[in-house]
Image (spheres, rainbow, N blue to C red):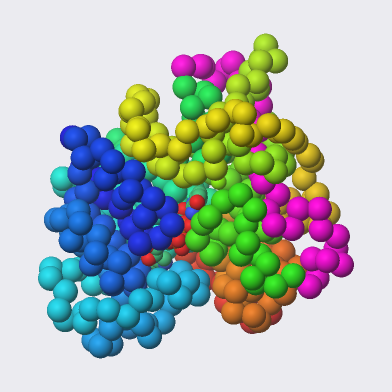
Amino acid sequence: MRNIVVLGSTGSIGVSALKVIARHPDKFKVVGITAYQNAALLREQQLKFSPQYVGIVAPDNTQVNGVADLKSGDSGLRLDASDATPGLRLSEKNNWVIGESCLVEAATLSDADIVINAVVGAAGVRATIAALEAGKRVALANKESLVMGGELVLQAAKRGGGEIVPVDSEHSAILQCLTGSSSTEVERIYITASGGPFRGFSKEQLENVTVADALKHPTWSMGRKITVDSATLANKALEVIEAHYLFGFPYDRISVVVHPQSLIHSMVEFVDCSVVAQIGVPSMELPILYSLSHPERIVDNGGCKFDPFRHSGISFEPVDSENFPALALGIKAGMTGGVAPAVYNAANEAAVARFLDGSLKFTEIPLVIEGALSKYSQLPADSIEQRFEADQAARDYVRAH
Ligand code: NAD
Ligand code: MG
């Protein structure tokens, strides 16, 4: 039996993770859950899984008449309305830990073996570091942890004996392709991208896209922030940086290829020209389960089966770098290193929040990111505090432009 903590249990990945865990009561037990402000769903999950630890960030928790009117907190993201269900009075909650510190507390519970980090944004970084320092396996959905923390996250794992196993479907695919091989046998990693809802759009068409258009992803159903990131291709930049740190490959050996059907989740080319790909229907349930079972596999009768005859036609295209400049900007930030990826990530989060609230156009997202990068990429990056200072500077810049 492995004891699991789910950070961000009320989000898209968090809910899928609990669904996967519920199918395997003989293998996994939920010992902790945390959310930002969806108290009603958190309470439901508490009743269903009886974890020993329940935490809620609940910004501005002086409001005791419900959580509907709580404001978004330090992540700078405007949260989905579905994450603000009015419900319990905070004062009625039994043994809930309230406040930001619940993330690190839950991530370091002595009983926990695996921490699924499904928080969105830079708000998840400290919990990743703390869990790794405490020797846990971190099943990492929060890609922003590796983008912002980079080598600091890897050092935390080394210090504490923790390990990172990716949840992101592309990285799970790469891990599955690599398992059993030596890294010296690998020539190149191909990260696949659906291309998002605006694949094939011209510059003029992109000028006029709306929030509703951006939230209609062709193949994946996900939280709002990553859905917008998939439309700008910033998500792929975050994933290239994530892959660089996870697998230790230089940027010039990681390529992005558009694959509109989202059936091949990524590929590894070996030195003998063999290419191994991982295929499956676009569902996060397999990568979540694999992050818990790796390097083994578990029988999953409720899993999503792939039927090759229903999915004919697998195609590839190059990325349209000209119309989707956020990808190249992010890869450049990754290559620059230091604080640049953290600046890219924070500027992107703030820009997405502004796009979602209607104060920034879709095509302005990469422009403000570029502005923040040119101003703050040289700030010091030796500690996570310094990276959070740069993160704040980038957010302030984007809010003011
Ligand atoms: P989501 O918005 O649906 O859920 C986010 C979760 O984090 C919620 O439970 C929310 O309560 C919590 N949260 C939000 N802000 C917080 C804060 N400031 N402090 C503490 N908790 C906070 O997002 P999602 O789509 O589930 O994505 C979660 C992470 O997984 C992201 O990093 C995303 O890039 C990554 N990811 C998601 C998918 C997917 O299919 N949804 C796929 C790959 C990777
Ligand atoms: Mg992904």
Residue 265, image x, y percentages: 58, 36
Horizontal relation, residue 298 to residue 217: left or right: left
Q: Is 117 within the magenta?
A: no
Vertical placement of residue 357 versus 371, above or below: below
Residue 389, image x, y percentages: 49, 67
Q: Quadrant of the N terminus?
A: top left
Look at the image and tell me whether residue 261 can be seen.
yes
Residue at coordinates 64% horizontally, 80% vertically from top-left?
358
Write down the region rendered in magenta. Answer: 180-208
Residue lying at the far top of the rendered structure: 272
Front residue of 43 and 175? 43
Q: Is 186 within the magenta?
A: yes
Residue at coordinates 15% horizontally, 79% vertically from top-left?
92
Front residue of 139 and 316? 316
Residue 281, image x, y percentages: 54, 38
Vertical placement of residue 212 versus 104, above or below: below
Horizontal relation, residue 48 to residue 279: left or right: left
* Image-quadrant location for residue 252: top right
Look at the image and tell me whether residue 342 can be seen.
no
* Image-quadrant location for residue 192: top right
